[in-house]
Image (cartoon, rainbow, N blue to C red):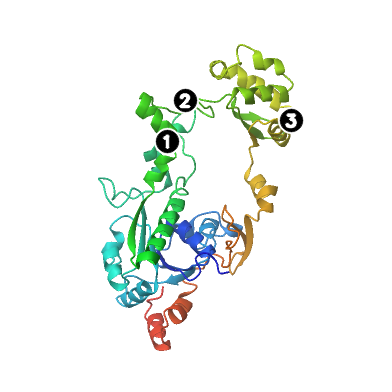
Amino acid sequence: MGRAFEGLKVLGFTYAGTANMVMRVLGMYGATVIRVESETRPCNLRSGAPYRDDKPGLNRSGYYAMYNNDRYSLGLNLKHPKAKKVLDRLCGWADVFVENFTPGTLDRLGLGYETLKKIRPDIIYLSISGQGQTGPHHFMPSYGPQMQALTGHVNLCGWPDRGPCQVDQSYPDFIIPAHATIALIAALVYRKKTGKGQYIDASNLEPAVSWLAPVMLDYTVNRNVQTRCGNASPSAAPHNAYPCQGEDYWCAIAVTSDEEWRNFCKAIGKAELATDPRFATIRARKENEAELDRIVGSWTANFKAEEVMRKLQAAGVPAGKVNKIKDAVDDPQLRYRNYYVPIQHSEIGEYEVLNTGYKLSRTPAEVRLPFPCLGEHSELVCREMLKMSDEEFLDLLTNDVLK
């Protein structure tokens, strides 16, 4: 059988991460994906470290490599007057148009939905933006750190005696692609039934807020404003990362019920702690959490993190080794499920692409293409996909339209 999106044609005017993650999934499941880029304003991820062999270059970024496989790169100078003819043909070719610029940007370039549906009436147009296309703050450009701040994530990360702390440099950019892909599939089903396309307005802010539903509920019901509490949880104890043997190795343990607490006490050879008045209930454990963390840490320090994890998991207690990046790359579970896929690139050589986190039994994902060099497929796109004549292509090439 063909892959799930076999035959689907996708055109992307994208920047940074979010929309490119959507196109990556579509490409790995069989869609033909073209990304329009330009030497005059290359994607910021192309200049994002780390680089292969620490040598900077627009075609050497590991950051770009991870989110841009399985697509074709068309170099196009949008400021050139002859670019419009190329754009019109591209938009007529595409089933799906994907963009993630600040609202209004593509309208000003003549690439808004109302314009494109005149060229392709059944086109599905997906816009991903920081806060949606409407509302008092829709015009604000943003990246992951700003979204973390606006959603409140930053104020929940870190320690009570310190300032707010970022999760990482791009979270929650990894949330909206899944939501946007679901919306896109729904639009494709609708088009198959009705023959009509539609516009999808996807906000990065809204699904990111949904991940804080318990915190939101606590405020709306109890008017309680949760804030930074380190690794602690209001409904679990012990709930922390505890030191283990070796340099900077830890194990995360989360005991969420009295039954797990009793199992934990047996596993560490201290069954008497289960009935100790200081720890017998969740309320008591929370009130004596500092002492509890000391007891747990003194036990974990005697073992390697893997040993702690296996002992507690065998006893029915949630526990996981805190992996370093090397450990995650070498993880036997991820390797067994072929999550890391080796592929060859013309400039940086072999590297590994991340697979999807799910497997379709009849139409599995497949990594076919490495990330493209900038403008690598301009001739292929123009001549084979858009069916341009030799004269048309040479005219674009010699007039610096394809750059």
Mark toward the start of the polypeptide (1 vs 2): 2
Residue type beneath disc 2: Pro
Mark toward the start of the polypeptide (3 vs 1): 1
Tally the numbered discs.
3
Q: State whether residue 327 is above or below residue 359.
A: above
Q: Mark 3 points at which residue?
A: 303
Answer few, some or many: residues within 10 Å of disc 1's Cα (few below 14, many 20 plus, some between 14 and 19): few
Image point (49%, 74%), residue name? 377
CA gap, disc 2 and disc 3:
29 Å
In the image, residue 159 lies at what x, y percent?
49, 28
Answer few, some or many: residues within 10 Å of disc 3's Cα (few below 14, many 20 plus, some between 14 and 19): some
Q: Can you tell which of label 1 and label 2 is closer to the viewer? A: 1
Relative to the observer, which residue lies in front, 262 or 357?
Answer: 262
CA gap, disc 1 and disc 2:
21 Å
Answer few, some or many: residues within 10 Å of disc 2's Cα (few below 14, many 20 plus, some between 14 and 19): few
Q: State whether residue 392 is above or below residue 363.
A: below
SS of the residue under disc 2: loop
Residue type beneath disc 3: Phe
Q: Name the residue under label 2.
A: 160
In the image, residue 1 lies at what x, y percent?
58, 69
Q: Name the residue under label 1.
A: 213
SS of the residue under disc 1: helix
